[in-house]
Image: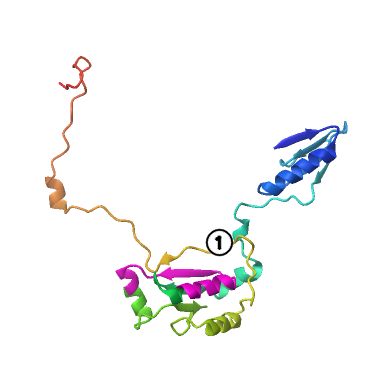
Amino acid sequence: MRLVLRLRPRLLLGLVLAAAATTPAWAVYKVVGPDGSVTFTNIPPSAPSGSVATVPGIAASPADAGNRLPARLSSLQRTAPVVIYTTPGCKACKDGVRLLQRKGIPYTEKTIVSAQDAAAFKRMDPGMRVPLLRIAGVELPPGFDAAAWEQSLHAAGYPEQSELPKGYRFALPQPLVPQQPAQPPRLPAAAAASVPPAPVLPPPNPHAPPGFRF
């Protein structure tokens, strides 16, 4: 975007600000040339011949700015990560997830959907009870207990009220055991050697009638 104005800078500035309110924010520079012309641009001037100023209230912001954690939560996510283990169709699991979201707790959800997931979870909790919450590597008693969860989160340093930015998107559930891509079946060496090579067809005859190959 590069807009040049010579006569009515206030009108153009209003249009630039209006556009910024409806599109992702960017840095806008006001360049006044030696002849008095005013240019608004989102391209940083490399060697301006006149004065340059940044338009207040418009700053660059990436598309995923809504998912950037505040410094406090970012530090807690590293030192005291929150992991919840769930199964589909479990009402208590959904209640636990809603509590974490309501309190603005960045979490990882591991869901048990396959036999491999169930076997891995059984090694963690032989009773196979969900939901299971882990904070900073410490497992709470299985089952949803709102008061105990909130107390443990507060003791780990998480805030009482959500501090997540507006528009924050929580991560989608992940299988407890990462799924491996399917590998094509491999033939034994002897069987592979016995497979006849693909026939090499002769090049098409340009004089052959349509639909025929000689």
Helix, strand or loop under label 1: loop
Task: Please report the bounds of the magenta region as a residue range.
Answer: 94-118
Residue 28 shown left or right of residue 101 in the figure = right
Q: Residue at x 34, y 74 (%)?
A: 120
Q: Nearer the viewer, residue 136 or 117?
A: 117
Query: In the figure, is residue 193 to the left or right of 118?
Result: left
Residue at x 79%, y 50% (from the top left corner): 56
Residue 55: in sight, yes or no? Answer: yes
Q: Is residue 3 above or below residue 78?
A: above
For label 1, the crowd category at 10 Å Cα-Cα, with few meaning under 14, some 14 to 19 and many 20 or more, is: some
Q: Quadrant of the N terminus?
A: top right
Q: Quadrant of residue 202?
A: top left
Q: Would you say residue 96 sits in the magenta stretch?
A: yes
**From the viewer's perspective, is residue 141 above or below residue 2?**
below
How many numbered marks have been drawn onto this rendered protein structure?
1
Is 91 contained in the magenta span?
no
User: Which residue is at a point 76% across and 46% down the rendered structure image?
Assistant: 17
| Amino acid tagged 1 | Arg
**Quarter occupied by residue 15:** top right
